[in-house]
Amino acid sequence: MQGSDGNRRPETWTSSLRSLLGVTMVVMLIVVSATLVGLDYRRARSAAIANTEEHMGAFVGRLVDRLGVLSGDTSAVVGLVASVANSFLVPPPERMIDKVAVLREGISRSPHIDGVYVGYPNGGFFHMVDLRSAAWRMALDAPRGATLAVRSMERNDQGKPFDRTMFLDASGLVFAERRSAPTGFDPRNRPWYRAAVNGKAPVATGPYEMATTKNFGMTISQAHRGNAKIVIGADVVLDTITDFLSRERLTGDSVSFILDAVGRPIIHSDPLMMQRIMAAKDRDGPVAAPQGNPLIESIRLNPPPPGKAGFVDVGDRTYLAIVAPLESTLLLSGHRVVVAAPLDELMAAANDTLVQGLAISGAVVVLAILLALVLAHLITKSLNQLTASAQRLQDLDFTTPIDVPSRVAEISMLNGAMNKARDAIFTFALYVPKELVRKGIESGHFAGRAGWRQEVTALFTDIYDFTTISERHSPEEVVAMLSGYFDLFSEVVAAHEGTIIQFLGDSVFAMWNAPVADARHAEHACRCALAVEERLEAFNADQRAKGLPEFRTRFGIHTGTAVVGSVGAKERLQYTAMGDTVNVASRLEGMNKDYGTTILASGAVVAQCEDVVTFRPLGSAQAKGRASALEIYEVVGASMMATAGDSAETGTAA
């Protein structure tokens, strides 16, 4: 650029006012923040450490209180039996009623007690189990309605040993009993018996993994006052302690664990570490310490002073740790609890305070940027809410309304459009089985018009004399009755892993093993028919109370290969199954009239589930439109579901 004097003017840099103000405010913020960093950080660091020490002390106190409650309640039950209950001076089956009455009262008041048992010097054994424990229910295959189980080792009139298990209902009455061959279990060899026999005070053994239930727990046992060779024991489930350690964390990576008298970890807040500890345990002895945990080894070698917080270096990370003895409780007495938290996480609050101070110092400079970020956040939040609503629509969830208020016109318009789409999809969903669509999408079988061969179990139903019912009642009444009837069917079929393919007038066509695979499809179909029949009793009772007719339903069930898939026109498809299997199920439903039955199944169904469902053979029959004869069976009932506990140990106590 030329001046009037002919000389070139020097070029100067230029920038926007926003940039200049931004740079200036950033520089000022750095200078002010540098002055405040030392003071604020030092104060925040000291406060964080002091606050952590206080929380660690409170944590240890709460843990001791929990152990005290567990110890006190359990010791009270064991002490009551050992000191007062003379009915336990004789082995079972003597004075069984008195034994049951005493232990039932103790267990009902102590939900953390897994069971109470008595070992006798002759090898006799008496054990009461609280069936609120799912593990015990599975292990004993407890019948429905049982709240307590009594296990005993006895001898018959010929002197031969046998094991007996009695099941008690909520009122304490025995309503089921089983006898089995002895398992060779001898209570005199168990740690809880050996530790307490001939003693006077209660003792604690464990912790260990209980043999039958696999729960993690300890045992408090005590010799009977009237006979020191009779030992009473109670299993204490320590799940509340492990959950407490895992839940009560000071920071994300903080840990807490309990060391035994020789410094081995027995309980750890980290579930993976707890699995390693349990994997290294002896069968009947205490858990053994897994090797190679740097933090545990550092604290074992260089522990902080008892009851005082100290710093422990583990690699390139520093922990603030406290070690406190557990002396005031019977459970875990003589053990030590360790709480450790990474120093960098403890200082996170101090860093947050510093960042907040810096943010306040630069608030005036970056006000425009912050406003833009807030606006962007609001827009993003609204869009995220709309995205979540769209995902719920994809899952056919219409329970949550789409309500995303916004002052941005485009977002408000989008919110209104999605609400209209929701209403439209909801309306069409009333005519299409939602579960069928959802299962089909999950299985990946809905891909246009296509069919494939698939073994399925088909169920057809029909209401007896429905034509007469329709003639005698108005259409509105018929629709209302059928709606309640179909609601019942929909609930029961879904509960038994099935899918309703179609409502055909008063009939229902349901299918198993498609679109989602089900290895027990024949069993589930039979159980579903029995469950519907049971539910119909209440439904018909309500019908009678209203002066309306009862619905007598007939069922036909058949298992076989069918062509399964989506058929129809280009613009309207229907998921269904076709073939001889479906036709046979329909024919079986109609054949109930000839046999005077309610549920008929074919031999193919029986072949798949005769071990869990009870059938009554009716011989061979010729189904209409079918060349070969069918073996016909009436579905009579279903046995109890097999459980994983069938093969579990049943002869050990702890």
Image (tube, rainbow, N blue to C red):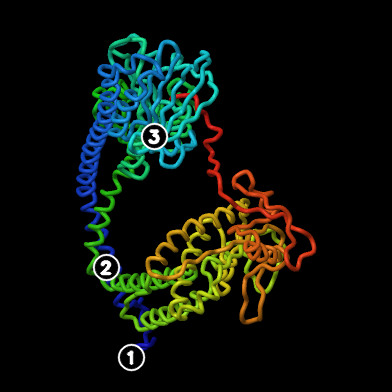
Q: CA distance from mark 3 to mark 2?
A: 81 Å
Residue 294, percent from left and from top = 43, 31
The image's mark for residue 168 is: 3
Q: Nearer the viewer, residue 39 or 570?
A: 570
Q: Residue at x 28, y 64 (%)?
A: 26
Count residues near mark 1 (Cα–Cα under 10 Å), then give few for <14, some for 14-19, many for 20+: few
Residue pointed to by mark 1:
4
Residue 14, percent from left and from top = 34, 77
Q: CA distance from mark 2 to mark 1?
A: 35 Å
Residue 131, percent from left and from top = 40, 36
Residue 324 seen anywhere in this rendered image of the structure: yes
Tell me which amino acid carries mark 1: Ser
Count residues near mark 2 (Cα–Cα under 10 Å), then give few for <14, some for 14-19, many for 20+: few
Tell me which amino acid carries mark 3: Leu
Q: Residue at x 68, y 57 (%)?
A: 559
Q: Earlier in the sequence, mark 2 or mark 1?
A: 1
Quarter holding the C terminus is top left
Residue pointed to by mark 2:
24
The mark lying in front, picked from 3 and 2, is 3
Instruction: Give left or right: position of 75 versus 214.
Output: left
Which secondary structure lies at badge 1? loop
Q: Earlier in the sequence, mark 3 or mark 2?
A: 2
**Relative height, residue 538 to residue 173 (above, below):** below
Quarter holding the N terminus is bottom left
Q: Quadrant of residue 250?
A: top left
Instruction: Give left or right: position of 481 versus 333.
Output: right
Q: Residue at x 80, y 64 (%)?
A: 627
Residue 310 seen anywhere in this rendered image of the structure: no
